[in-house]
Image: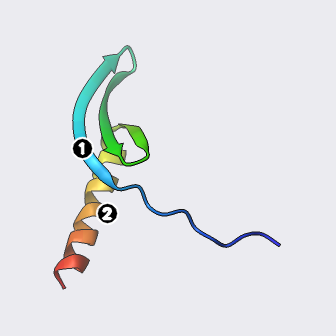
Amino acid sequence: MRSTTKALPFVPTEIHVSTVEDEKGRLGILSINTTEGILDVALDHATADAIANAIEEIRSRLAA
């Protein structure tokens, strides 16, 4: 039987934003320092929009 225990979420301690560009185009880099280490995420425009929408949803739920 599989274990159903979930890992605790990473706790952000610092957030940095940058961009990189190559022959395929530009990507946004979201670097999140956490209590467990650094999490780097590369985002294209569509993915950045999806994450922004998800964060807006979280904000509206927290405000309720």
Q: Residues within 10 Å of mark 2 (few under 14, many from 20)?
A: few
Residue 64 found in image quarter: bottom left
Q: Is residue 36 visible?
A: yes
Q: On screen, 44 above or below 52?
A: above
* Residue sitting at the far top: 23
- Residue 24's spot in the image, x, y percent? 40, 20
- In which quadrant will I find the N terminus? bottom right
Label 2: which residue?
54
User: At 48% across and 63% down in the image, what residue appears?
Assistant: 8
Label 1: which residue?
14
- Residue 52's spot in the image, x, y percent? 26, 55
The amino acid pointed to by label 1 is Glu
Q: Is residue 46 visible?
A: no
Residue 60 found in image quarter: bottom left
| Disc marking residue 32 | none
- Residue 31's spot in the image, x, y percent? 32, 37
User: At 27% across and 48% down in the image, what residue appears?
Assistant: 13
* Residue sitting at the far bottom: 64
Q: Secondary structure at mark 2?
A: helix
Q: On screen, 12 above or below 26?
A: below
Earlier-in-chain disc, 1 versus 2: 1
45 sits left or right of 1 in the view: left
CB of mark 1 within 8 Å of CB of mark 2? no
Q: Residues within 10 Å of mark 1 (few under 14, many from 20)?
A: few
